[in-house]
Image: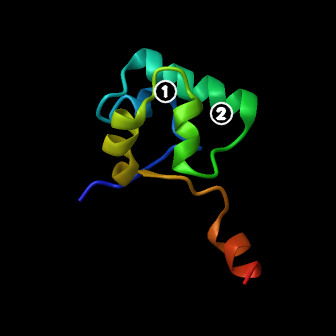
Amino acid sequence: MWARININQASAQELIALPGIGPVKAESIVEYRSTHGLFRHSDELLNVYGIGPKTLRKITPLITLDTTDTRHRRSLK
């Protein structure tokens, strides 16, 4: 089983492993993240140039949006 790719931490090179994501889209994701901050919902990827609903549907099961480590998450409960 493959590990999901953390869209908030992955490099452009790692993002290329996702279906429908080539070098240009991967760089666009990294640039968008650098400019706008971490993704909180997968739908935010639709704001990235070149990412449409079809691509989003393909990659959603393969990504994670984890923005915190386990210790922090537990402290919020």
Q: In which quarter of the image is residue 9?
A: top right
State the image coordinates of residue 13 (x, y, percent, origin top left).
Answer: 43, 27
What element does badge 1 sit on? helix
Q: Which of 21 and 54 is in front in this view?
A: 54
What element does badge 2 sit on? helix
Q: Is residue 43 left or right of residue 18?
A: right
> Which residue corresponds to the image point at 52% horizontal and 48% vertical from the top-left?
42
Q: Mark 1 points at which residue?
A: 12
Q: Which of 46 and 63 is in front in this view?
A: 46
Q: Which residue lies furthest to the left in this view?
A: 1
State the image coordinates of residue 24 (x, y, percent, origin top left).
Answer: 45, 15
Q: How crowded is mark 2: few (under 14 residues within 10 Å), some or many (20 or more)?
A: some
Q: How far apart are labels 2 and 1 at the CA level?
A: 11 Å
Q: Point out the image quarter for the N terminus.
A: bottom left
Q: How crowded is mark 1: few (under 14 residues within 10 Å), some or many (20 or more)?
A: many
> Which residue corresponds to the image point at 73% horizontal and 33% vertical from the top-left?
36
State the image coordinates of residue 17 (x, y, percent, origin top left).
Answer: 33, 34
- Relative height, residue 16 to residue 10 (above, below): above
What amino acid type is highlighted by mark number 1?
A: Ala
Q: Is residue 44 left or right of residue 23?
A: right
Q: Point out the image quarter for the C terminus.
A: bottom right
Q: Name the residue under label 2.
A: 33
Colouring scheme applied when the structure was drawn: rainbow
> Which residue corresponds to the image point at 65% horizontal and 55% vertical from the top-left?
67
State the image coordinates of residue 44 (x, y, percent, origin top left).
Answer: 59, 41
